[in-house]
Amino acid sequence: MAVSGKISKKELEYDGNRASIPTSSVPKGKSGLVHVWGRNDTTEAQQLGIAWAVIDPDGVARENYGAWESWPYTGAGKEHEFIGGRFSLDKAGTWRLNAYLYMDPSNPTIVDRYEGTLCVVVSAEPEVTLFQILDYVVT
């Protein structure tokens, strides 16, 4: 039987807030948690698996997550939610998510992928600019 599935939903949870991936304007210093839903597009129950990496603005992997769902497996047309571990969104800039949905653990097959922006983290600190006195006039 041919396997077929789709990453049907992606969300970033940060300190009690949830937003669809990709999202913007996440305050620096929040704690992140990725949620990814995989859908079984076959006519029989399938065991779904997921793997993802969260990459910070400097290109460093901050979370590597992988899992296969346990019994009972996802039925035809149904979805399964995968939830990773917490990581700190401690760098301003664009964070990336590389996520891969699998089926058939005896012969793992990638059925869908997302490789793109996870979020844009913005600095919560005020931006300080140089202040200079260029001319001083006594009146």
Image (tube, rainbow, N blue to C red):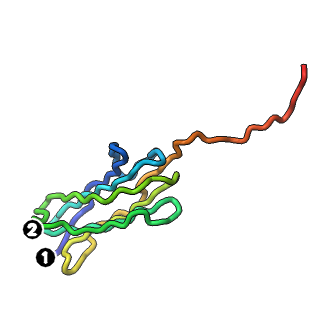
Residue at 45% in and 53% down: 89
Q: Earlier in the sequence, mark 2 or mark 1?
A: 1
Residue at 53% in and 62% down: 58
Give the x, y percent position of residue 107: 21, 80
Return the residue nearer the eye: 47 or 29. 29
Q: Which mark is drawn over residue 1?
A: 1
Would you place residue 128 above or below residue 78 in this image?
A: above
Return the residue nearer the eye: 86 or 74. 86
Give the x, y percent position of residue 40: 17, 63
Q: Amino acid at mark 2?
A: Glu
Q: Amino acid at mark 1?
A: Met
* Quarter occupied by residue 49: bottom left
Q: Residues within 10 Å of mark 1 (few under 14, many from 20)?
A: few
Q: Residue furthest top?
A: 139
Q: Which residue is mark 2?
A: 44
Q: CA distance from mark 2 to mark 1?
A: 9 Å
Residue at 11% in and 62% down: 76
Q: Residues within 10 Å of mark 2 (few under 14, many from 20)?
A: few
CB under 8 Å between callouts 2 and 1?
yes
Relative to 130, is 94 on the left or the right? left
Q: Which quarter of the image is occupied by the N terminus?
A: bottom left
Secondary element at tag 2 = loop
Give the x, y percent position of residue 41: 17, 64
Q: Which mark is drawn over residue 47?
A: none
Secondary element at tag 1 = loop
Residue at 43% in and 60% down: 96
Relative to 108, is 57 on the left or the right? right
